[in-house]
Image (cartoon, rainbow, N blue to C red):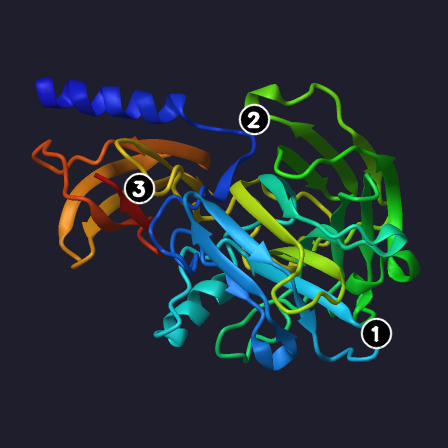
Amino acid sequence: MLKKLLVIFSLLTICINVQAQEYVLWSDDFEDDDSLATRNVGWLYLPEDLGIKDVLIYQKAGELFMRQGYYELFPGLGIGVGIIETNGTPAVLWDNPDSTKKLILKNDYTYPNQVLSFNIRFDRWRNLGETSSFFSVHSRLKLTDAQDSIPLSDATKEPCYVLAFWPIQGKIVCAKYDSTEFAAIFPDRMWNKFAEVKYKFELDVNYRAKFYLNEGDVKVKVWEGAPEDEPATWLIEANDPEPYVKGTFTAFAIIGPQPEPGMGEQIYLDDIKMEGWQPTNVENQHLSRPPQAFQLGQNYPNPFNPNTRINFTLAEKKLVKLTIYNINGQFVRNLINSELPAGSHTISWDGRDLRNQTVPGGIYFYQLNDGNRTESRRMIFLK
């Protein structure tokens, strides 16, 4: 009798947690000990064979640091650049490119309809007047070449939406550019600007930003301080009558005049979070699944201690299993083994095994199975 009551209670808890709105697709607070930022969220750096030199990017003390280098493809123009990107892939394993490639090509970590939030701090910025460098976020970037050993998106070739900050000039621009090569580098000549507003930036101050894209609706908030200080109104609200929703990569970049070696502009990024929801009726044929199809989301927070939440979506009413395994593939615990309705669901795990004992710290995998399909994700339990 007690067992039946516990099962009923679990089902009621799951039903209460059904969500019909946006949810976290991936996030990174850079709190793990991986200086290359390849775990939790797998960040990709553009390789030197594309001509980018003297860039410095590393994760330290709960932040991601990036120093601008230069583009040697433009020796006469003197272009400085630094860039890092992801589609939310849980990990980039440089010593296992085949595994990493499979994760990236699954491409189910980001939907085109999204809310991207992040923290940025400008650490060093040269005062170059009208030619000053800018920081930019490039969203809905498309995969450039699926045949690459580590596939990524080249922001200098792929069309996207862009949010850009000019710290010295004190302005914010929201725009879109097409597939003209190197359009990302020339905002005045090659960007279709939706809005430009004045905003006073200072060095060594934490700013929060929220970049909202829903088909053709584009919104932006920027504020100083913590997430709870978020203003009620949007700083920018615009609409693109011809929305572009095909890409799923997101890039952060510093672009501007070429610096002296080791003297490029510097930023710190933190608390990056991508929330999303299923697309509706605009150019969603590129997705491998229809809206509300079978999907397992990345747990949040990750790494975690002691609790984390796991989101998943079912296309139809199904008997599903959600199971935890350790890094050796050994069974840890079933979180769900029951029939659930179609839609989005959330369940929590408190880091305990089948015997209600707290598991050791380390890497774990959670697997969702509906009898026909199986998806797995990695998570990190910190102790």
Nearest to viewer (mark 3 / mark 2): 2
Report if residue 341 is visible in the image. Answer: no
Residue contact at pointers 1 and 3, CB within 8 angstroms: no
The local crowd at label 2, few if under 14, some if 14 to 19, many if 20 or more residues have their Cα within 10 Å, is some
Quadrant of the image occupied by residue 258? bottom right
Q: Is residue 370 above or below residue 185?
A: above
Which residue is at 60% across, 26% downward? 225
Closer to us: 340 or 157: 157
The local crowd at label 3, few if under 14, some if 14 to 19, many if 20 or more residues have their Cα within 10 Å, is some
Q: Is residue 317 above or below residue 144?
A: above
According to the picture, the residue beneath numbered tag 1 turns out to be: 77
Residue 170, position as x, y percentages in the image? 81, 39
Amino acid carrying label 2: it is Pro
Closer to us: 71 or 110: 71
**Secondary structure found at label 2:** helix
- The span from disc 1 to disc 2 (Cα, nearest Å) is 39 Å
Which residue is at 43% across, 43% downward? 62
According to the picture, the residue beneath numbered tag 2 turns out to be: 227
Residue 78, position as x, y percentages in the image? 79, 72
